[in-house]
Structure formats: C-alpha cells, structure tokens
Image (spheres, helix red, strand yellow):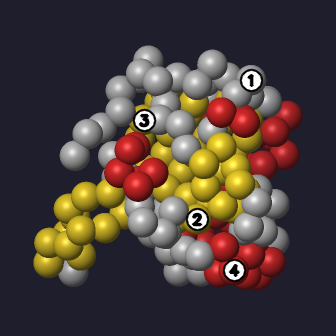
Amino acid sequence: MTQLEPGSLAPDFTLEDQDGASVSLEGLRGQRVVLYFYPAAMTPGCTTEACDFRDSLSSLQAAGVTVVGVSRDEPVKLREFRERDGLTFTLLSDPDHSVHDAYGAWGEKMNYGKKIEGVLRSTFVISPEGRIEHALYNVKATGHVARVRKLLGLD
C-alpha cells in the first residue's frame, strides 16, 4: 500500500457526489481541501466524525477550507446521510475504491481480531495548488476534527 507524503501531488479524481453530480479535485484547485475517507455512511463512528466536521464547518470555511468526505456508499445513501444528519459539505461515492487506493486509504486492517481488506479511516489536507500538506492515516473518528483544526492553525 502506498502512502502519500507531504509535498507530493494529490492524486486527481472525478467522483459522483450525493446528488449524482461529478466533482473533481482539479475543480477544487485554488482552495485548501480537507479530503477524508470513512468506512460507511450512517454507522456510529462515521456519523460522529461527519457531525464533528459539520459542527466545525463554518470556521473551516471562514479559513478558506473545503471539506469533502469519501466512502464506497452509493450517491443515494450519501444523500440520505446528509439529510439525516444535516451535513452541509460534499460527500463523494467511490464504489470501486479506486480513489481510496490512490490515496492509500484502502488496505489490510484488523476487525474484531480478523485481518480484512477495507477502508483505512484517513484524512488529507490538500493545498490550493493540489499538493498534500498533511496525510493522516488510521485516524480515530472521535477527536479527529480537533486534530485537523490544530494542524490548520485554527485552534
């Protein structure tokens, strides 16, 4: 599994969002992006993480940061997740986990004592020029947004 390093070019992608519209990383150039990968919409840990991003969104946006979440869920489930939890940022669907692979956010992990292949909860801060500023792998859902805010100099 390849892990991205600060300074490297962020892999470009185009994925469908919760409304079926195409979103590309190239289309977000010029703004700082927090791109986070999570296992599944509407599960407890992923809901905690998404709601933390939601609750921090106004201060992140005020600092010029765009938040984008990525999972393997289909757009219809992502739309349901956004509506259920009042999420106001973009959620992207990567059903074949190709973008997860490009970012090193897919691989072997332990689940209840068993080795499985799956999503490695990861977050990337991408510069306005499209370079990796921070690459955080195997993060915990709880308290993670506070750590991102510190890295961005917001706390």
Q: Is residue 83 visible?
A: yes
Q: Is residue 81 visible?
A: no
Specify few, some or many for label 4: CA neighbours under 10 Å numbering under 14, 14-19, or 20 or more. Answer: some
* Three-letter amino acid code of the residue under disc 1: Gly
How far separated are the C-alphas under marks 1 and 4?
29 Å
Q: Is residue 15 above or below residue 7?
A: below
How far separated are the C-alphas under marks 3 and 4?
29 Å
Asked if the residues shown at circle 1 and circle 4 are in contact, with their CB atoms under 8 angstroms apart, the answer is: no
How far separated are the C-alphas under marks 2 and 4?
9 Å
Q: Residue at x 42, y 66 (%)?
A: 96
* Three-letter amino acid code of the residue under disc 4: Val
User: Helix, strand or loop at disc 1?
Assistant: loop
Residue at mark 4: 76
Asked if the residues shown at circle 2 and circle 1 are in contact, with their CB atoms under 8 angstroms apart, the answer is: no
Q: Residue at x 71, y 54 (%)?
A: 22
Left or right, residue 9 beside residue 19: left
* Three-letter amino acid code of the residue under disc 3: Ala
